[in-house]
Amino acid sequence: MDRTELAWAAGFFDAEGWAAAVKSRRRRRPFAQINQADADGVPEVLTRFRNAVGVGRVRGPKREDGKVDLYHWVASSRSDVARTFEALSPWLGPVKRAQVDAAVGTSATSAHIPSSDEELAWAAGLFDGDGSTCLLWHRTHPGYRTCEMSITQTSRTGVPEVLTRFRRVVGLGHLNGPSGGTEKWG
């Protein structure tokens, strides 16, 4: 497995994925999923994620009137969920790591120290999932625009670790929040 692609996949899962133990018939089983909407077919990021981790399925589209088609990467067996997160664990942030541990019933640890290239790949994955770029009107220079890039995360306990980590890895930016009376950082 390509470690840089796995680092990207961990960042993307930190942004877009979730894991839980879901009820299935008479028992609970591990389940992990990433949702992505795309009007043009299967989103490339889901295929890239699936190829990086080597397990799971890409499903969809789910169609609803007035909405963009929805696709999912899904791992629904204990072995696929465990394998996915064994591969991602060197880079995965604490929130998603705790979700996986609860879903699989393990305590994932990693002795691997990511390289700077792997950390940049993780940051790219996080931005691919939750990042945005826009042009805003400059507040003091009429007729001029500024470019803004941001990643928004929520938290009940202060600044999300993935945001401080992202800022450290890319060496730029600042943290704003909470905004609107909620713990929304970005």
Image (cartoon, rainbow, N blue to C red):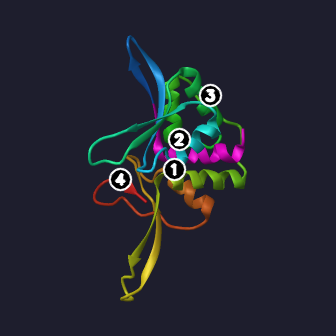
> Residue 40 at x, y = what percent?
45, 50
* Residue topped by disc 2: 94
How far, Cα to Cα, is label 3 from label 4? 33 Å
Q: 32 or 90: nearer the eye? A: 32
How far, Cα to Cα, is label 2 from label 3? 18 Å
How far, Cα to Cα, is label 1 from label 3? 24 Å
Residue 171 within the magenta-colored segment of the rendering: no
Q: Amino acid at mark 4?
A: Glu
How far, Cα to Cα, is label 2 from label 4? 17 Å
* Residue topped by disc 3: 83
Q: Are the residues at dot 3 and dot 4 in contact (C-beta closer than 8 Å)? A: no
Q: Residue at x 67, y 36 (%)?
A: 110
Q: Are the residues at dot 1 and dot 2 in contact (C-beta closer than 8 Å)? A: yes
Q: Quadrant of residue 64?
A: top left
Q: Earlier in the sequence, mark 2 or mark 4?
A: 2
Q: Which residues are magenta?
A: 1-19
> Residue 58 at x, y = what percent?
51, 35
* Residue topped by disc 1: 161
Q: Residue at x 49, y 51 (%)?
A: 129
**Residue 183 marker:** 4
Q: Earlier in the sequence, mark 1 or mark 3?
A: 3
Q: Earlier in the sequence, mark 3 or mark 4?
A: 3
Q: Quadrant of residue 61?
A: top left
Q: Amino acid at mark 1?
A: Glu
Q: 182 or 33: nearer the eye? A: 33
Q: Secondary structure at mark 4?
A: loop
